[in-house]
Amino acid sequence: MTDLAKPPLTLLIAAPRGFCAGVDRAIQIVELAIEKYGAPVYVRHEIVHNKFVVDTLKAKGAVFVEELDEVPDGVPVIFSAHGVPKAVPVEAADRGLSYFDATCPLVSKVHRQAERLVADGRHILFIGHTGHPEVIGTFGQVPDGSMTLIETLEDVAKLTSADPGNLAFLTQTTLSVDDTADIVTALQRRFPSIQAPRGEDICYATSNRQAAVKAIASACDAMLVIGAPNSSNSLRLVEVAEREGTPARLIQRAGDLDMDFLDGVKTLGLTAGASAPELLVRELVTKLAERFTINEQEVEATRETVSFKLPRGLEAA
């Protein structure tokens, strides 16, 4: 198809998008460990929720496993960015395994808050999604029965507490900002003395990417989000666009795009979840250019300058 025959498409690309500082750090930890120790280096669970990233690291020598009993003796192991229960590093140490913790520092901050709150005698109402690795890891920081999971406003309505004066709440870092605010408001109405976290638990990258989608969604006929179906923050970006009245789809790669979704679309929004590399954004733009004459515009809602230190033992690798 010649350029003259291609229909025009205005492409509004949200910024910030894609990798956050925690994901950058986690991937770097795996790459540096392979560089320092040689392959194979074992990783417990997906280092981040993105198949392209995981497959790229596999090709470099990373081996992904579900549990530590799959890790042979004498090889390094890395814990994913989502965090792990306390029992996991204890088990690694008991086996004499060298390990590096790639838990995002903002998730680790929530872990420390949970420990402090339980030590102070408070029961924690944790806002999050059942089965998410971050939720499992956070619950694993404190004794059983110290936390109750809250997913919806209905969960708040059904809550009972033997000691309503000693409650606190924390949240998963990758939630919908708007939905979480509604749940927090309901909790505070139900339990006026409930203790809030020190600062916002939803991470800066999650908040910024949602705000960037809001900034463009109303100007778009449709929105595409690049991310994995098990990526909480990516799914939330789809929801944010749809809440603004814009049809949205989550895709992992350019090859997953159903072009019928773009029928009649003159302005398309594009973003990527925090675990999706920019390479996948460019791949999709290239695919779109096969069918459309692209007028590409980046819309920057805010600029990110956050970075995190690497663990000891890898800094000089």
Image: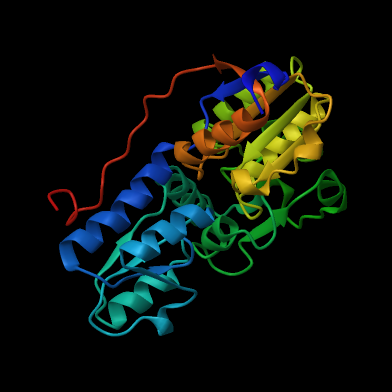
Quadrant in the picture for residue 194:
top right
* 195 shown above or below 304: below
Q: Nearer the viewer, residue 118 or 181?
A: 181
In this rendering, position of residue 67 left or right of residue 11: left
**Residue 314, image x and y in percent?**
19, 54
Which residue is found at the position 61% from the left and 62% from the top?
Answer: 146
**Percent position of residue 30, x then y:** 31, 58
Q: Is residue 120 left or right of residue 232?
A: left
Instruction: Please report the residue visible at 27 percent of the width from the left and 42 percent of the height from the top.
Output: 309
Q: Residue at x 25, y 77 (%)?
A: 75
The x and y percentages for residue 33 are 24, 61
> Residue lying farthest front?
2
Left or right of 239, for residue 98 = left
Residue 287 percent across, percent down from the top left? 60, 36
| Residue 179 visible | no
Q: Nearer the viewer, residue 209 or 252?
A: 252
